[in-house]
Amino acid sequence: MKKLLVCTGGGDCPGLNAVIRGIFKAAKKTKEWEVYGSIEAFNGVMADPIQIIKLKKSTVGGIHVKGGTILKTTNKGNPLQFPVQDENGDIIFEDRTERLAEKIKTLGFDAVINIGGDGSQKISNALFKLGVPIIGVPKTIDNDLSATDTTFGFQTAVQIATDSFDKLVTTAESHHRVMIMEVMGRDAGWIALHTAIAGGAEICLIPEIPYDIQKVKKKIDSRYEQGRGFVNVVIAEGAKALDGQVIGTNREHVSEHLRLGGVAFQLSQELKAVGCKPEIRETVLGHIQRGGTPVSYDRVLATMFGVKAFDLVEEGAFGKMVSFKNNDYCSVSLEEAVKDYNFVDKEGFLVKAAKAMGMSFGD
Ligand code: F6P
């Protein structure tokens, strides 16, 4: 029997379990492969004793409907930049990919599938260059990978955000308030933009379109002057003001960001500082966008990604990442996959259409 190792790295995302199940079922059908899972990304491989589990029918049965990942995940322990203390006690970062590649070979794995975002696929690419037969599967709720048209988890995040937005509209209307809802999106504003269009927000602030606080205030004032009496704003956590001030993600992790009040709170302070009169309330959705059961679209996409990843293993097409492009499941080289990001095009149709709906981006 050949041995396949699967792992999930980076932030979790609804659909990870559906990918694992897709891989397992496709592999089992051949009767030639045993499937193993490394616990907490590649940390399970490097742990002493190793933390690798053999996947069975009973481990993966029905997991496609569950959020999170049965293999656990982490942002810590990146083998490309592993934190260690030097002789002065200072933290320095060392590249441990060679050690990791050696360990994978020693453990006798014939193939590896690494499910993760940009950071994880950089690790996949480094391991491939060191001779590890590896395939990447893209994962991000932010939809910011350029090598695939979409990623699982994104639709689920947008649905959660839209449901929350709809709830905030009725309370904004009842109280004549400005409601600011902050969503995830460290570098790219896809979740914010899709939620704002789906919910019918008056204002949407995203990292790709730096905003002018005076223009945001003007939009709010005009709504009240027209007698509409309430405003709903969607802001991405990485939104930037026009003067270059990053009000968003000056922090290591979301929890640090929240401790600082989040972008929603900072925007509300800025609006008050420029004389915005209506009452303002802030809501930060945070990790709720990454939790719970994936919507059916993400379950399908994730399952297909799993099956496609195993197809690539069978073909021996290593060094590739699974992708969904032009309505088709395909693959791209890992080298290509980690080159660029997918940002919202501020001149693109989505932004133009949103503006046609009366939405302001504060630009
Ligand atoms: O990369 C996906 C993402 O959802 C970002 O939008 C967000 O900044 C980040 O994860 C938060 O992750 P964590 O709290 O796990 O560091």
Image (tube, helix red, strand yellow):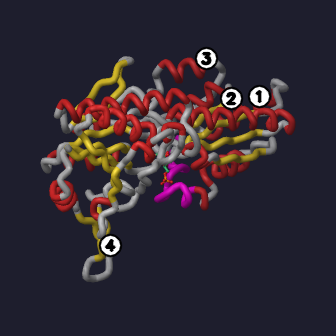
Mark 3 residue type: Ala
Q: Marks 1 and 4: CB-CB under 8 Å?
A: no
Q: Residue at x 60, y 60 (%)?
A: 260
User: Mark 1 or mark 4: which comes first in sequence?
Assistant: 4
Quickly name the residue at label 2: 202
**First in residue order: circle 2 vs circle 4:** 4
Residue at mark 4: 91
The residue tagged 1 is 223
Amino acid type indicated by mark 1? Arg
Closer to the chain start, of discs 3 and 2, is: 2
> What amino acid type should be assigned to the residue bearing mark 4?
Ile
SS assignment for the magenta stretch, majority: loop
C-alpha distance separating marks 1 and 4 = 52 Å
**Real-space Cα separation, disc 2 to disc 4, in angstroms:** 46 Å
Camera-nearest label, 1 or 4: 4
The image quarter in which residue 179 lies: top right
Instruction: Find out whether residue 244 is within the magenta segment.
Output: yes
Is the CB–ligand 1 distance for label 2 below 8 Å?
no
Q: Amino acid at mark 2?
A: Glu
Viewer-proximal residue, 106 or 331?
106
Give yes or no for contact between labels 3 and 2 (Cβ–Cβ under 8 Å). no
Separation of residues labelled 1 and 2 (CA atoms): 9 Å
Q: Secondary structure at mark 1?
A: helix
Residue 109 visible, this orientation: yes
Work out whether mark 1 precedes mark 2 in sequence or the reverse, and give the earlier one. 2
Q: Of label 3 and label 1, which has the lower sequence position? A: 1
The residues colored magenta run 240-257
Q: Are marks 1 and 2 in contact (CB under 8 Å)?
A: yes
- Residue 288 x %, y %: 61, 46
